[in-house]
Image (cartoon, grey):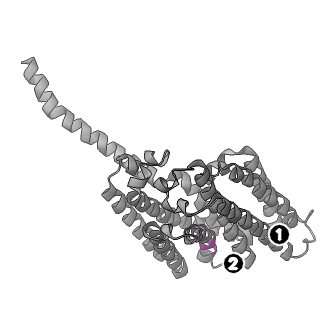
Amino acid sequence: MTERRTALLERTGRPRREPVARRASLPLGVLRTARPRQWVKNVLVVAAPAAAGEIGRHTAVQLAVVFVLFTAAASAVYLVNDARDAEADRAHPAKCRRPVAAGDVPVTLAYGAGAVLGAAAIVGAAAFCNAMTGALLTAYLSMQLAYCIWLKHVLVVDLAVVTTGFLMRAMIGGVALGIPLSRWFLITTGFGALFMVAAKRYSEAVQLEGDKGTTRALLNEYTTGYLRFVWQLAAGVAVLGYCLWALESGGVAAQALLPWRQLSMIAFILAVLRYAVFADRGTAGAPEDVVLRDRALAVIGLVWAAMYALAVADL
């Protein structure tokens, strides 16, 4: 009797428990594939309104909506990208732990979740924002999907596409609020993004020397010398653009204690130099880790933000 009961439990009990565990792990796996740690990049949606001094109670709500919409769009791209790159990711020392590559999330589910999030982002932009916001978000999704399918294999264009994605993040907040975008703002943001993207590629090339083609085929086409040249050039242009932007703003307001906007150039340059330390070492493969974990860079960033806020407030 005991043997029959044990056999019955084995036939009926285990199948019931395994699907429950599977269902519990799938949402977590999909969430991990959506890259919650990468969502910090979408804070860039406040860049244009902050630079223009247009952040208030009303605009904060609108920007929160834009942040959610862009996060949904970016997560959709991550899901599709991981579904397409599952095989290559299994050869990467770190990416092999991604849920799709590890087999925790089925490829079809990743594609389906990505499609739903992408469609929701576009519909949400049309419903809660203006037409230009919806158009920009649609362009972002189209460009990123083209990157996943084809453009990631085109030399130099891959760097331009990833850089443009960051630039679109910085633009969409201003577009949603109808704020004109300064040409110096676009130059600084664009080349600052290129600096980080090229530094990331350079770090990957350094860390995966000899195995570059198995994880990112295009890395075989780049030399470390070329990637170093790109991030150094981009850093220089970003610094120049920021300085011209700060100096173009004109004189100091009568009530201001100090020329905060001009002084913020010091903090900005220090931040670029500090990040360049990690780029030069080949340890800038995860930009979000560098930004969030390096205390000195965090302090410099806070000082810069304080100076710029004082400049915007004319204090």
What's the residue at 73%, 49% (across, down)?
298
Depicted 227 relative to depicted 214: above or below: below
For residue 172: magenta? yes
Q: Tell me the SS state at disc 2.
A: loop
258 or 37: nearer the viewer:
37
Depicted 264 relative to depicted 161: above or below: above
Callout 1 touching callout 2 (CB < 8 Å): no
- Please give the residue where the numbered disc 1 appears in the rendered image: 243
Give residue 47's position: percent from left, percent from top. 67, 67
Residue that extends furthest to the top in the rendered view of this protein: 2
Give residue 203's position: percent from left, percent from top. 62, 53
For residue 99: magenta? no
Residue type of the residue flagged with mark 1: Cys
Residue that extends furthest to the front in the rendered view of this protein: 210
The magenta stretch spans which residues?
169-174
- Is 270 placed left or right of 38 in the picture? right
- Please give the residue where the numbered disc 2 appears in the rendered image: 181
Residue type of the residue flagged with mark 2: Leu
- Measure how far apart labels 1 and 2 are at the Cα level: 17 Å
15 or 46: nearer the viewer:
15
Q: Could you tell me which quadrant the N terminus lies in?
A: top left
Considering only order in the chain, which callout, 2 or 1, is on the residue closer to the N terminus? Answer: 2
Residue 136 visible in the snapshot: yes
Give residue 220's position: percent from left, percent from top. 54, 60
Is the magenta region chiefly helix, strand or loop? helix
The label nearer to you, 1 versus 2, is 1
